[in-house]
Amino acid sequence: MAGQVILVVEDDPNDVLLIQRAFSKARILNPLRTVSNGDEAVAYLSGEGQFADRDIYPFPVLVLLDLKLPRRSGLEVLAWTRSQPGLKRLPIVVLTSSKESSDINRAYDLGANSYLVKPVGFDSLLELVKSLEVYWMMLNQSPDVFPGWPTGGAGADAKQAGER
Amino acid sequence: MADSPTGRTAPRRLVPGISIEYKLPIFLSVLLLTVIVLSSWAAYRGVRQAAFTTARERLSNVTNQLASLLRAQGGQMGALIARAAANDTIRRFFESPAPQTRLNALAALRRMGPTPEQVIGVELWSAQRERILTTLTQGSYFGAGGQAENVQWAVNPDTAAVGRIQLIGDSLAYPVTAVVAGRAGVLGYVVQWRRATSNPRSRESTVQLIGSGAGLYIGNDRGDFWTDLLGQVPSPPVNVRAAKGILSYERSGKGRMLAAAAPLGTLPWTVLVEFPETLVAAPVTLFIHRLVLVDLLLVALGLLAAWGMGRSIAAPLRDLTAASAAIAAGDYSRSVAVHRDDEVGQLAETFTTMAQRVHDAQTSLEDQVRARTAELQERNDELEAFGYSISHDLRAPLRAMQGFSQALLEDCGDRLDAMGREYAERIVAGARRMDELIRDLLAYSRVSRAELQLVRVPLSPVAQRALAELSGALRARNATVHVDEPLPVVLGHPATLSQVLMNLLGNGLKFVPPERIPELRVGAEQRDSIVRVWVEDNGIGIAPEHQARIFRVFERLHSTDDYPGTGIGLAIVRKAVERMGGQVGVESRLGHGSRFWVELKVAAGDGS
């Protein structure tokens, strides 16, 4: 359980820091990996470039995805993920500051599993993170995900399978 | 949304009651017919009257001339026979009747008749008026029944007397008597029986004189015998001798007759001339026939002319109407092909110009609207981008301020003195307040811009949900809430309605002085198709002069220290209710609480 990585896609270093603090305050042991833009998120999920080493950058069990990102937006990342046969079941929770119903509806249309708004108060953030852990890490039953299949390399696939 | 404005209805009456094309001819022909019938009637009356007047004059003239002719002939004939009677042979026979003188007298009589044309026979009668000698055969005489009393006896030896017409055998004849005078007075009489008929040829020439078609009759003054000079005819149906002037009667089998009769003085006869009225009226009938023919021709011509005229007016009008209808339907390509110099042509020309102007105006208007719409859309997009930017970008630094000052307090609190901690707390409070401001502004802009689909919304669950959302705040103030169930069903947008009720309840809760326990009450009343929902509190109330201001954005009556808030809550309520087609208001007394109300439309099918 402790080894299951959560990928945080977030461009604001303040928010990254606050999320990390909330995770540690909530005593959640899952390691966090962060990327700061959409392209990096795609690269991480496909295990390419600097993220090729799955020992350092293991495939995540949950993605916390901001919508407003440099280069590729969160919605684009979402759309890309859902178009990958091996990744389309990956649980993705949108965590963003927008409360616009257009954003909410679009995210669900593209296949987001949940949509959360970043609270301003830290206490609220703490509560949110705790709920996230309880729900997604303890209660929720994870689906089978096959990263890299069928487009990814066979080696990455084998390594991932071995880890599991 | 329920009563959308009814669309423009183009005036499409291309088939009105009756077209001018037909109206004009109908009107004109009715007029023409009336005039023609009236004038023809008058003309007919006039011509007929003139014809009959002429006929009467002619009839009377002819009759009088005939009468005087017959009188003259009668006189001559009488003189002739009187001279023949003054015959010595005949006188001798009267003075000394002997076989020889008798034979001589008979021979003398035979010289006077019979003749094949006019005389049937001649007789001698005694002074005692007994027949003593005759040239007539016995049979024919007795068969005819010539009677002595039917004979007019002459008195004067110079003139003979003409008697009445009677049947002698199968002939119509009349006696003419002349006196045979001796020295001692009247010895006897010569009676010549003359035919009352003439041969067809001479009769025809006489009738021709009067006028063809006319009838010429001679009858006894007593009216017992009438002849048309060919044979015996029935008497006329009136007593022509008693009547004066022109007669008019029906002769059986021959129709209506105009007739004139004249006595013949010494002759015991009456002459009668008849003109058949059909004959008199024949030229009139001919005239009226021709008139009717001409009139019909005139009506036909008038009809044709009126139809042509109506058509020449109606056809371009129809074109204009069709073009107008096309323009009303938005088709400006229709042109009116009327090239005339008269009023219709001017109308068409003006119409074309007008249509062109309207078209130009509409095109330029459409262009303008399009440009403005695009401009507006651009502004709207900018505004949306602005709102989006606020919701994302402005909040991120807020979260940092808030999160890190809290982290500072929690993680490094032991190294801060009281002043440092207070500063950090003030940063937290400021950040929270700014977050609330941004949240409310976004809510206001959302409610202003968002497309609100109005549906049937039962208010009770909406109120319950709003109360559930506020349950924390309500508990904190120990407030009591009473809802006058059941609340009605209105036409609205569920999420927006929920926000409205929440804002009103939150507002009511907020403006209760701290020492007072808040009492809130929610209710509704329906008037016709409007539902008024109200939220009542026992708060500080609002002075009348401020009541209009509180629904505006950023309007606050109190400092945030006394009553925290952004000043946008009621503005959101007003904007939201207006977007749902309703209105808002407040009734309040300073110090005694307020009653905020919103009016919404009753959902269709839920009216009382």
Image (cartoon, coloured by chain):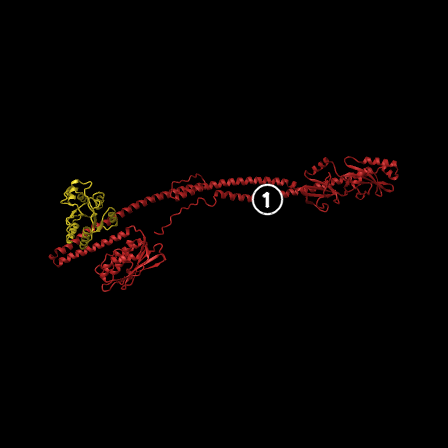
Chain colours: A yellow, B red
Amino acid beneath label 1? Trp
Residue at 25% over, 50% down: A101
> Which of the two residues, A135 or A43, is positioned nearer the viewer here?
A135
Across and down, in percent, residue B89 comes to 86, 36
Across and down, in percent, residue B268 comes to 76, 43
Q: In this view, does B77 lie to the left or right of B98?
A: left
Residue B508, relative to residue B363: is it above or below? below
Q: Residues within 10 Å of mark 1 (few under 14, many from 20)?
A: few
Across and down, in percent, residue B535 comes to 29, 60
Across and down, in percent, residue B494 comes to 29, 54
| Residue at numbered disc 1 | B41
The subunit letter for the residue under badge 1 reads B
Residue A41 shows in the view: yes
> Which of the two residues, A151 or A112, is positioned nearer the viewer here?
A151
Which of the 4 quarters of the picture holds residue B94? top right
Farthest-out residue, left:
B415
Which of the 4 quarters of the picture holds residue B530? bottom left
